[in-house]
Image: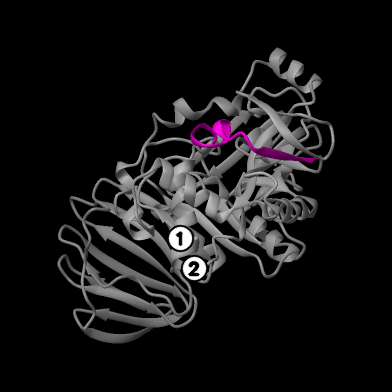
Amino acid sequence: MNIILLSGGSGKRLWPLSNDIRSKQFIKIFQKKDGTYESMVQRIYRQIKETDETAKVTIATSRAQISAIHNQLGEGVHISPEPCRRDTFPAMALSAAHLTDIQGIDPEESVVVCPVDPFVEKEYFEALKALSVQAGKGEANLVLLGIAPAYPSEKYGYIIPEKEEKLSFVKTFREKPTAQKAKEYIEQGALWNGGVFGCKLKYLLEKAHELMDFTDYQDLYDKYDTMEKISFDYAVVEKEPKIQVMRYAGQWKDIGTWNTMTEAMEETVVGKGIMDETCKDVHIVNELDVPILAMGLQDVVISASPEGILVADKEQSSYMKPFVDQMDGQVKFAEKSWGSYRVIDVESDSMTIKVTLHAGNSMNYHSHRHRDEIWTVIEGEGRTIVDGMEQKVKAGDVITMSAGCRHTVIAETKLKLIEVQIGEEISVQDKEKHELE
């Protein structure tokens, strides 16, 4: 089974845990059997592999998310990076070209495309396998997975099948409606359009070449910023006359807000948090190393991270975006392929950061023009290279780099350090990379 997972943009509806770099699918909030936590992308990738260990998974995403994906899934996962944002049709066209030109997959094979962030169980992935098989038969050019609606929702488009059977040809589509219209559609047997479909890989490529001017993967990648921003639904699905829909009635939740996220959480408290017995339907998600106490609250979510603290009615939290847009946009936590960093303190002429490097990883060899840096190793062992001079470091060691000094650190074990930046102009742009001789 070939699967393309669409990993979308940053989003701010799960602030303060999501930011311009850390999208909602990378938040580790779902508890596993061993007591540790995993993110949406880790959960769905694990579930796919548990259902079909031979499945070939490709993640279509922006370049800004590559480091986080490697951090959470390892270096071996296939990634089709977008040079810039161009909506779902160009992203899927680029992914299809990646599968054929880079991965060498036969265009006659079927492929399933789905979003990375639904909350689902094993039956969903069994449905994806069935969708892939049906697409391979060639009875229709596209086979959609239609979600049996739980209620009349204004959030989704609707698929109206010709028949009530599990597999049917599609009669028509309906755009996101009013609640009253949604109720009428459901009475007609309509299904939610969850953005999941299967087809032969060659169909995606044919549509891409029909609507875009490119020769191969590299050519499309190079001219990607000139492509029209358009969704796959508008560009292809609504114009395709030969579509089937496969009915799916299992668990499926579209997690995009705190309201829906807390519905999917098995625990009411993640991190340091306590609530008294008068609290009802309250969730605490705390990434800070300080406790949160909740008393006498109902239908509230409390979330804390280095980005800020949210205390909100769950329903009202869906409308936070314009308020978050007014806040300081500096990212204070991010996961990278080499590890992660967390901003601890910011002053007008200094910044303090906690850096964690995975064993065997290192920072780029780089320098800064406008700031000095002091590293204090607090855990693990490794090596530093400062202006070409290499030395071993361990917990308790302090390394000082003046502005202009070239430096890096290599983690031999898991390595944690406190980095203090001092200077009149501290900026993420003040970084020049160098080749390590």
In-front residue for pair 314/64 = 64
**x, y (%) of residue 156?**
64, 29
Which comes before the other along the chain, label 1 or label 2?
1
Q: In terms of secondary structure, where does tag 1 sit?
A: helix
Q: Quadrant of residue 340?
A: bottom left
Q: Residue at x 48, y 73 (%)?
A: 358
Left or right of 86? Residue 138 is: right
Amino acid beneath label 2: Gln
The residue indicated by pointer 2 is 103
Left or right of 118? Residue 435 is: left
**x, y (%) of residue 310?**
55, 35
For the residues bearing labels 1 and 2, Cβ distance under 8 angstroms: yes
**x, y (%) of residue 416?**
45, 70
Question: Looking at the picture, does residue 385 appear above or below residue 347?
Answer: below
Q: Residue at x 75, y 62 (%)?
A: 51
- Quadrant, the N terminus: bottom right
Q: In the image, which residues are magenta?
A: 233-248
In-front residue for pair 231/209 = 209
The residue indicated by pointer 1 is 98
Q: Residue at x 72, y 37 (%)?
A: 146
